[in-house]
Image (cartoon, rainbow, N blue to C red):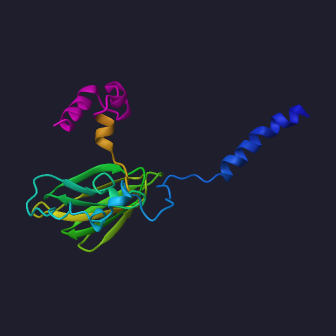
Amino acid sequence: MAIKSFLLMPLVLTILAISRPSHANDPDILTDFITPNTSSLSPSFFTYSGLSAFYNPDPKNFTVIKASMTEFPALNGQSVSYAVLQFPAAGVNPPHTHPRAAELFLVLMGTLEVGFVDTKNVLYNQTLQEGDMFVFPKGLVHFQYNRNHNQSAIAVSAFGSVNAGLLSVPKSVFTTGIDENVLAMSFKTDVPTVQKIELGLKK
C-alpha cells in the first residue's frame, strides 16, 4: 500500500500543478484605485502631463517617453501604461522584448517597418502607414525601423501592464558580461568581432 501511495504522489502533484491558475499579468486589485495617501486625493493625482512636450520635428536619436507606474503612480493596479516613440530618419528601435505585457502600437506620423519573431522563429513583419496599428505579443522579440532616410516618425504604444519591462536583445547579450568566448561560439564568429560589437554598444 505504501508503494502504491509513493507511485501516485507524482501524479497527484502534476494534477495540482495543472489545475492551479498561473498569473503572469498584473494582479487584480480589490479597490477602485490605489493611492499613496487617500486623505489628500484630488483629480490631479489622475492627471499626467509628461507626454505633452514629446514632439521634436528633427530628432537626432530614437527616444521613448514613458507613462508607466514609475512616472504616473495613479496607474498602480490598473494594468495599463503608455509610451511615445520618436524615430529620427533611418532610426531604429532595436530588437527587444516586454516580458510582462503585449504592446499595441499605433503610427501617428511617417511610416515604420515593424516585426516580431514567434517561438518557432517565424518573422511577422509589416510596413505601417499613419493610422495603422500592430500588436506585439507579450514576451516575443520585436523591433521598429524608420526606413525613410528623410523624414522622422512618431508612434504610440499601449501596454497591458503598469510595468511592461524592457529587455534589449543587443544590450542584454553584449553588455552584461557574458564570456566573450561563449558569445563568439554562439554567434559563429570570433572574439575580436564580439569585442567590436561590445564597444559599439557602450558608446
Task: Choose top left, top right, bottom left or bottom right for residue 68.
Answer: bottom left
- Figure quadrant of the C terminus: top left
Residue 134 percent across, percent down from the top left? 35, 67
Residue 33 percent across, percent down from the top left? 42, 62
**Is residue 177 found inside the magenta-colored segment of the image?**
yes
Q: Is residue 172 visible?
A: yes
- Main SS of the magenta segment? helix
**Is residue 96 found inside the magenta-colored segment of the image?**
no
Q: Name the residue rendered at 23%, 29% in the picture.
A: 195
Q: Name the residue rendered at 33%, 56% in the picture.
A: 73
Q: Is residue 146 visible?
A: no
Q: Nearer the viewer, residue 122 or 109?
A: 109
Q: Name the residue rendered at 29%, 35% in the picture.
A: 174
Task: Establish if 120 lies above or below 58.
Answer: above
Task: Establish if 137 lies above or below 191.
Answer: below
Left/right of residue 203 with respect to residue 142 in the rendered view: left
- Figure quadrant of the N terminus: top right
Q: Nearer the viewer, residue 198 or 97?
A: 97
Residue 45 percent across, percent down from the top left? 30, 62
**Magenta segment:** 175-203
Residue 155 percent across, percent down from the top left? 24, 65
Q: Name the residue rendered at 37%, 52% in the picture.
A: 163
